[in-house]
Image (cartoon, rainbow, N blue to C red):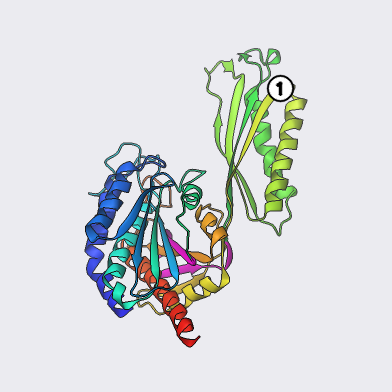
Amino acid sequence: MSDLFTLLESYFPEMVSTRRYLHEHPELSFKEYETAKFIQNFYKQLGITYQSNVGGNGVVATIHGRNPGKTIALRADFDALPIQDEKNVPYASKVPGVMHACGHDGHTATLLYLAKALNELKEHWNGKIVLIHQHAEEYAPGGAVSMIADGCLNGVDEIYGTHLWAIEDLGTIGYRSGPIMAAADRFSITIQGQGGHGAEPHRTKDSIVIASQLVMALQQIVSRETNPIDTAVLSIGSFEAKNAFNVIADRATLIGTVRTFKKETQVKVKEQMDRIIKGICFANDVTYEFKYDDGYPPVVNHEKETELLVQVAASIDEVTHVKEMDPKMGGEDFAYYLQKVPGTFFFTGAKSPNTLETYPHHHPKFDFDERAMLIAAKTLGSVSLKSLMSSHKLVEQK
């Protein structure tokens, strides 16, 4: 473990340089062709075997230890978001309208240099470590499902992943056994009314007024029809009905998201939405189209692997606080890996103590303290080696 930490510390300047290169050259979900090539070339130069085009643009590298043993998988995502980078930094995105606004560039750089260090030490540990570089986390159906279908988890005994979390203090490792992130669904509602002159509303069926009624009525699903003990979020993110100032819109579209942890809550919310939409549209004598797409399921961490993470995180010098997190309503397709094999997903604090203003994830000025990558690498490396060593001891005892 000490040798691993020493190597990672020596690679940290390269890790930062790689992260900044990736930050300058972001690519959107399902279009990460050059990023995938960059990852492949990195492993090729190290002589580490890898598979390309796994489930799409995914890359899976494998490092074999000295002797056979358990197989541990580590995962990092590498897609960016359709957001204009507004940071005034030398490494700002060079691609108009696209930026790494969620830290996936940091996840990738972390895993690459952890792989480099583990490869140098492969004669000192037994088993196998699989590095899963996943495309398209940001946009459902995501890359995890197709990568799993393409065999990225074949033979894997455990899996671990982390998210650099820019709104949590540097030095914090956030964990939780059980549900830690929510199911993330998407919906759209299109109201087809009857347009007309703004001076004669009585001759129209005002789609904006009707859609406005829906915005308010749908909020009652969470506030008045969902058990307060259960957790649910229903948010309208887009309300579109473009028209001239003196024209009553014939069509209005609402787009939003639903977040839940329990399947029965998710099903109930969908049913209640359908009933409310149908009732309001019937009352206003208009037609509608309601589409609801199930997104990622909840991220549910396994107890044993989470306990191991807590144990190793507490032993890392740079980790100042190991914290049990409240469940988050954000979504993550890491959930699919945890449905197949045991593991845990945790948060690595990346908020700089010297930053006066912190911008949240998916913000045009999003950034993070790059020292968090070193902490993430040490934590992922530690939990991997600890698990491999414990399994080897059990084999020896038997």
| Residue at the spot 43% in from the left edge and 51% down from the top edge | 361
**Is 392 displayed left or right of 202 in the figure?**
left
Residue 126, how many percent across, how many down?
37, 75
Q: Dot 1: within a 10 Å radius of its alpha carbon, few (fewer than 14), some, or many (20 or more) residues?
A: some
Position of residue 295 relative to residue 208, above or below, is: below
**Is 284 displayed left or right of 81 in the figure?**
right
Residue 174 covered by magenta stretch: yes
Is residue 352 among the parts visible in the rendering? Answer: no
Kindly identify the amino acid type of the residue bearing the numbered disc 1: Val
Q: Which residue is mark 1?
A: 286
The residue segment tinted magenta is 157-179
44 and 168: which one is in front? Answer: 44
Position of residue 163 relative to residue 280, above or below, is: below
**SS class of the residue under badge 1?**
loop
Magenta span dominant secondary structure: strand
Residue 61, how many percent across, how many down?
35, 58
Instruction: Quadrant for residue 163, please give it.
Output: bottom left
Residue 170 covered by magenta stretch: yes
**Is 34 displayed left or right of 344 in the figure?**
left
